[in-house]
Amino acid sequence: MDIPRDLGHWIGFGGAGGRPAQSGDARPGRTAWLDVVEPATGATFARVAAGTAADVDCAVRAAQRAFPAWSALPAAERGAWMERLAQAVEDRMDAFVAAESRDTGKPVHVARAVDIPRAILNLRYFAGLIRFRTETQSRPRPGVTHTTVHAPLGVVGCISPWNLPLYLFTWKIAPALAAGNCVVGKPSEVTPLTAWMLGQAAADIGFPEGVLNIVQGTGPEAGAALVEHPDIKAISFTGSTTVGRDIAVRAASRLVKTSLELGGKNPTIVFADADLDTAAREAARAAFANQGQICVCGSRILVEASVYDAFRERLMAHVGALRVGDPLEATSDLGALVSQAHFDKVCAWLEIARAEGARILTGGGPTNPGGRCASGWFIAPTLLEGLSPECRTNQEEIFGPVATLQPFENEADALRQANGTHYGLASSVWTASLARAHRVGNALESGLVWINCWMERDLGMPFGGVKQSGLGREGGHHALDFFSEIKTITVNHE
């Protein structure tokens, strides 16, 4: 797949010949472009269009024209188109893997094992699910039948983040398309490459014109225009709590449906009866996967006091063994942070932690792999201890390779600390007691609770958080319901 230097929008593409209306070329009159930088090297390798409200409006109009025909297709035919798109991505696996690694700074082997396969699975899962979805439910009574119908909304907006670019972009557009909607998607301007490639793949297979539209650009410009567009019927957003709160306010003025998957300050809780070796290994993975840039990463590690020292020794050994290096190298466990701005933010958080009295057990700052990555944005995986549960480092989302270690005295203390933030996305609990697992799992203020595991996912199960971690649920029928208008039709047969 040839990737141009200038990454433009995909608006109203498809149809005869599969050629896009816009495929990376500047629209007449466009002068604004944004640099796309490789995190591992700090070098600019492309430009992405700085989309405007006019671009968003163009995409919405294309989607509106496409909606009657797409929504009228039988579910099996919509699913078949999504299967073709999934196959087009799979056929270009090597190109997508290389692009995702280059764009985000994550190791190539991670993109190959996780990101791109999951993006393909997202498309295939919802393509299959919509085929077998029960579109109606009936409750007959003498002389009367009540029926529920799931109807598509129309044109919907999907805004995805930079940490898992194609993975989370497809996680939104797949259920939206499957439910019969037409989509205007806005990927992060920091990592736009694989969304552009998805548009190219869709154009190459002649995906129906106007059904999937991709507008590049910044959140304050293109994102805000999408949220505020009068003809957008729903917004699905994954990103920071600050931006999610702003979207909620803007959408509320029009009573538009919103699904908001936001931040987390997730606890990993280790009880004394746990398998400490396994818990330490998985706590390290939960804290530092994807350089700590996953919303469900376990950044607060809470350990029962009686085994604190023994667990800390094991955990430090696992973290110390993590190799930070060139994303192209198979031996690299961690790559670069996604941008200079984010690198600076995480470095600033490390200074705040020091000022709050943190003791640094591992890492503590930038690291330099050398070679072609000498100017990249790398931070060593950092473990901190000695901080109070109420300090900023333990309360605010850092979203980087930084985790804190804290002791607790008993189950009640563990729950007090775990629940003592404004967030409530994910938790993991390590214990040999099934009774305790159920007690603690039910008491945690968290949308996701893993017992003796982390990041075990089933795409049909609900995903989402409580408190400041978001509104609504994604996954399976929950996502299809969000992208549908559910109405009741009652017929009097008499």
Image (tube, rainbow, N blue to C red):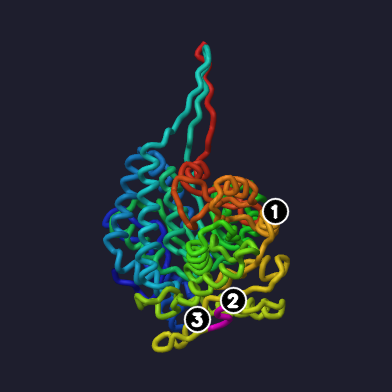
Q: Is residue 365 magenta?
A: yes
Q: Identify whether 4 is placed above or below 43.
A: above
Q: Secondary structure at mark 1?
A: helix
Q: Position of residue 493 (x, y in %)?
A: 50, 14
Task: Determine the CA span between mark 3 and mark 2.
Answer: 11 Å
Q: Amino acid at mark 3?
A: Trp
In this picture, which residue range is highlighted in magenta? 361-366
Looking at the rendered structure, the secondary structure element under dot 3 is: loop
Q: Main secondary structure of the magenta part?
A: loop
- In the visual, does 418 lie left or right of 67? right
Q: Mark 3 vs mark 1: which is more N-terminal?
A: 3
Q: CA distance from mark 2 to mark 1?
A: 32 Å
Q: Quadrant of the N terminus?
A: bottom left
Label whose residue precedes the other's in the sequence (2 or 1): 2
User: Which of the pair 426/191 is nearer the observer?
Assistant: 426
Residue annotated with mark 3? 377
The mark found on residue 412 in the picture is 1
The residue singled out by tag 2 in the image is: 346
Answer few, some or many: residues within 10 Å of disc 3's Cα (few below 14, many 20 plus, some between 14 and 19). Answer: many
Q: 378 or 6: which is nearer to us? A: 378
Q: CA distance from mark 3 to mark 1?
A: 40 Å
Amino acid type, callout 1: Ala
Residue visible at 48% across and 35% down in the picture: 150
Q: Is residue 183 above or below residue 92?
A: above
Three-letter amino acid code of the residue under disc 2: Val
Could one spot residue 268 in this view of the protein? yes
Question: Where in the figure is residue 138, as x and y percent of width and height?
Answer: 48, 24
